[in-house]
Amino acid sequence: MDFYLTALLQGLCFSGIALGIFISMKIFNIPDITTDGSYTLGGAVTGILLTHHQPVYIALPVVLGAGALAGALTGIIHTKLKINALLAGILVMTGLYSVNLTIMGRSNLPLIGTATLFDLLHVITDPNQNTFLILAVVVFIVILLIGYLLKTDFGLAMRATGNSESMIRALGVNTDRMKITGLALANALTALSGYLMTQFQGFADINMGIGVVIVGLGSVIIAETFINWLSITSIWISLALVLAGAIIFQLVLAITLDIGVDANLLKMVTAVFVLLIVGIPRLAFKR
């Protein structure tokens, strides 16, 4: 049972990554690999600020700003230097490894004796329920803000940039600026996941972001499968399904551990699971 409770809480922590991947890949059609670095960046900034006794409400905007800066850098390299988006993300992600290591000063930074978000707010006496409630409120607020943004004129311009860049450019919209802003927003959300996960697990680690883009991608693909099956057009329902996809992804990994699969094989199981959810719907469509 502990596996499933932890999976639920981790799914909520990873919702920022899933939303970030949704924005970069499904709205802008940009495969952004900066995710691996910006997730760790969020954790590194959170860890160093909390260990220096800065309150969590001070750490949060700094984390969001750091993630947005990383995403904007990828966008600038892609749009202004005309470098392939995938390569731009890889370059920034590689550089962020050194940045994160410099910020933390070591490879692993435990949050011993620090006050985290889950320690400061005691809404419910049971610690697990209290953690769940705090994460649920944070995720709800994030989805509310992102959904509202995507419904505004600015958000519609962002979505149109991904759907038909030439058309929206003909209407006078600066598509380069839209891409930079979109990648900044996506990586700010990814850094938010690092912020939450670092406090949830009690430490920041330089390798915590390795392969995390697969988690976000798998969550989005799960959501996309339901969106296509149910022919959903509402942005609110789509965002809710992305959140559900992040939780389902973690629950599948929890089931894998619960049935006795070696934890050393968890990354391989993750890769196979993503391959299945990508491949099976396409095979069914061809038939």
Image (tube, grey):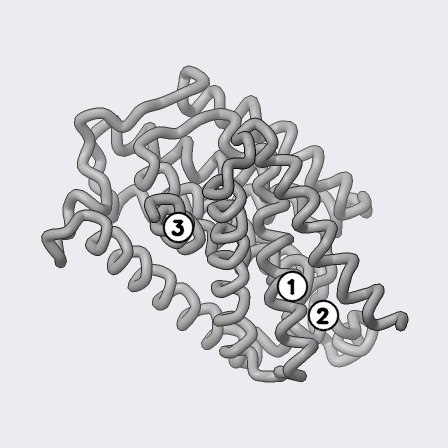
Secondary structure beneath dot 1 equals helix
Residue 80: percent from the left, percent from the top? 75, 48
Give me the residue at 70% from left, 75% from top.
Answer: 160
Helix, strand or loop at mark 2: helix
- Residue 4's disc is 3
Say which of 83 and 240 sits in front: 240
Q: Which residue is mark 1?
A: 178
Q: Residue at x 39, y 42 (%)?
A: 197
Whether residue 73 is visible to the viewer of this picture, yes or no, is no
Is residue 157 visible in the rendered structure shown here?
yes
Position in image of residue 192 (x %, y %): 42, 49
Q: Nearer the viewer, mark 1 or mark 3?
A: 3
- Name the side, left or right, on which 77 lies relative to 119: right
Q: Is residue 240 above or below residue 70?
A: below
Badge 2: residue crowd in 10 Å (few <14, some 14–19, many ≥20): many
| Amino acid residing under circle 1 | Met
Residue 225 numbered tag: none
Q: Are marks 2 and 1 in contact (CB under 8 Å)?
A: yes
* Residue where numbered disc 2 is placed: 161
Q: Are marks 3 and 2 in contact (CB under 8 Å)?
A: no
In terms of sequence position, does the residue under pointer 2 or pointer 1 come before the other? 2
Residue 283 in the image: state x and y as whole percent: 84, 64
Tag 2: amino acid: Thr
Q: Nearer the viewer, residue 281 or 150?
A: 281
**Quadrant of res 137:** bottom left
Q: Is residue 224 depicted above or below 97 in this figure? A: below
Report whether 198 appears left or right of 148. Answer: left
Cβ–Cβ under 8 Å for marks 1 and 3: no
